[in-house]
Amino acid sequence: MGYTSSKEYAELEWPIDILIAMVWVTYAIVFFGTMIKRKTKHIYVGNWFFGAFIIAVAILHIVNNVEMPVSLIKSYSAYAGATDAMIQWWYGHNAVGFFLTAGFLGMMYYFMPKQAERPMYSYRLSIVHFWALIILYMWAGPHHLHYTALPDWAQSMGMVMSIILLAPSWGGMINGMMTLSGAWHKLRTDPIMRFMI
């Protein structure tokens, strides 16, 4: 049909955007409702990543898809120019990043210790990894817009935050790998461990 909102990763028109937001909010209610009713006091680090992934993707989707409908199947963005580009790549970078990265890290922090039958190598490192990822990742989107009409400060911030993101990335990888100390033999037979590595 050719009807799109002409935004990369956010092509769907406003009625479908509303349905996606409703499904995502329902998912958040189920997830956080389950956490509130939990029987154990401790919350797995993996659930922190899943919670962040749910909240971040919901905020990103809703803010990026603020549109003015002109018909049932056509709408125009509420933003224009460099602002629209910045919000689009704030969404594009982080929706993919939080949807894939935080979701996978949540699985890693849950399944690696379970399958290795060992505690996570460093709880403190997992806390630093989580907060560094949350704080830094949101600012990295402008690296998609170098040499554009975006203000220089935003382009520079995107570049710097992208480089700084190496630290939490390596920290999470080291935490996952060190959790396997003494359990490397399980990689031969355990498909979950193979997937995580």
Image (spheres, rainbow, N blue to C red):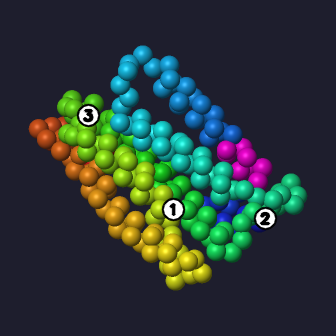
Residue 40 at what x, y percent from top left? 38, 19
Q: Main secondary structure of the magenta part?
A: helix
Q: Which residues are magenta?
A: 14-21
Q: Is residue 165 left or right of residue 186?
A: right
Instruction: Answer whether labels 1 and 3 touch (C-beta < 8 Å).
Output: no
Instruction: Answer whether labels 2 and 3 touch (C-beta < 8 Å).
Output: no
> Which residue sits furthest front?
153
Q: For the residue marked with disc 2, what is the amino acid?
A: Tyr
Residue 32 at what x, y percent from top left? 53, 30
Mark 2 crowd level (few <14, some 14–19, many ≥20, 10 Å Cα): some
Q: For the residue marked with disc 1, what is the amino acid?
A: His
| Residue sitting at x 52%, y 83% | 147
Spatial separation of the CA atoms under disc 2 and disc 3: 47 Å
Residue at which label 1 appears: 93
> Which residue sits furthest bottom?
147
Residue at which label 2 appears: 76
The numbered disc on residue 113 is 3
Spatial separation of the CA atoms under disc 1 and disc 3: 29 Å
Residue 130 at what x, y percent from top left? 36, 46
Mark 3 crowd level (few <14, some 14–19, many ≥20, 10 Å Cα): some
